[in-house]
Amino acid sequence: MDPRRRKVGSHDRADRPVFTHHSAALADFDGALFSDATGFIWEQGRQNYLITNWHVVTGRNALDGKSLHSHGGRPNVVRALFNTRVQQFLKQDHVIRIRDDDDRPLWLTHPSRGRAVDVVAIPLPYADDNPILDLHPVNRYAAEELTAHIASEVFVLGYPFGPEPPGYPVWKRGGMASEPDLAAIGTGYYLIDTASRPGMSGSPVIRRIWNQRVDGDKVIPSPTPLRTEFVGVYSGRRYTKNDSDAQLGLVWPRRCIEEIIIGNKRDED
């Protein structure tokens, strides 16, 4: 595969807080590339998962179920590129099956809403003590609980133009464009004000603050110079008829991942 098409892993240097690790979400069918995107690792108990979007693994629009490709095909593997413990910038390419021998999905979907939550969890066969792969689950390193308000600054970490050397993600700035507390009783997702490209589907969205944080109407000094919180999973821009319309992105909060993993329901696509 052309190395310019690969999405690669990322973690901070040892002298800075490590907060995330990226891997690929390159959807293939028997070697034919369908799409590229972003993914990240999530741990629950002793199990690691690759988190990305439902539309990435199915090749279908999560809103209406229609194919995103003119040929109407769907991927059967995800090609992932992980960081290794052997050398900091060394990557290792892995093919992860997302369908079993009977063509049934291996990924987990939301137990009650299904594709209406455009997030999936793909169980991985790699443990934390893997002697080769350096996984860095995002929920281990971005576990701060920061208060997010409308207009709070967030970052979408992904690969809009592919993994250009040295293969670290682009930090795309955005702002919370809807009230976070209303997501649970409304659409289920947040809106953020940012423009993006398809390669950023499945990106982790983080909030990062320096030296102080806002809690209600109070400004509280931070005990550490840098704090990072995982906000959710980016799933692309809200659909409009014209790309020049309001550029608002969808972010599914972390509870969606937790509900998917606890529900442990394989998709029926």
Image (cartoon, rainbow, N blue to C red):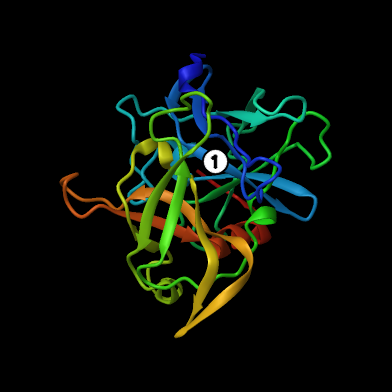
In the foreground, 265 or 177: 177
- Residue 171 location, x and y as percent? 44, 44
Q: In the image as oriented, which residue stretches furthest toward the top?
A: 2
Task: Write down the quadrant of residue 129 in the picture.
Answer: top right
In the foreground, 265 or 20: 20
Left or right of 207 in this view: 72? left
- Residue 224 location, x and y as percent? 65, 65
Q: Is residue 41 above or below residue 175?
A: above
In the foreground, 194 or 45: 194
Secondary element at image label 1: strand
Left or right of 122 in this view: 236? left
Q: Residues within 10 Å of mark 1 (few under 14, many from 20)?
A: many
- Residue 19 location, x and y as percent? 63, 50
- Residue 122 location, x and y as percent? 62, 43
Q: Which residue is mark 1?
A: 39
Left or right of 130 in this view: 186? left
Residue 116 in sight:
no
The residue located at (40%, 76%) in the rendering is 182
The residue located at (71%, 46%) in the rendering is 48
| Amino acid at the residue labelled 1 | Gly
Residue 119 in sight:
yes
In the foreground, 152 or 120: 152
Q: Is residue 217 above or below residue 63?
A: below
The residue located at (68%, 48%) in the rendering is 137
Total labels: the figure holds 1
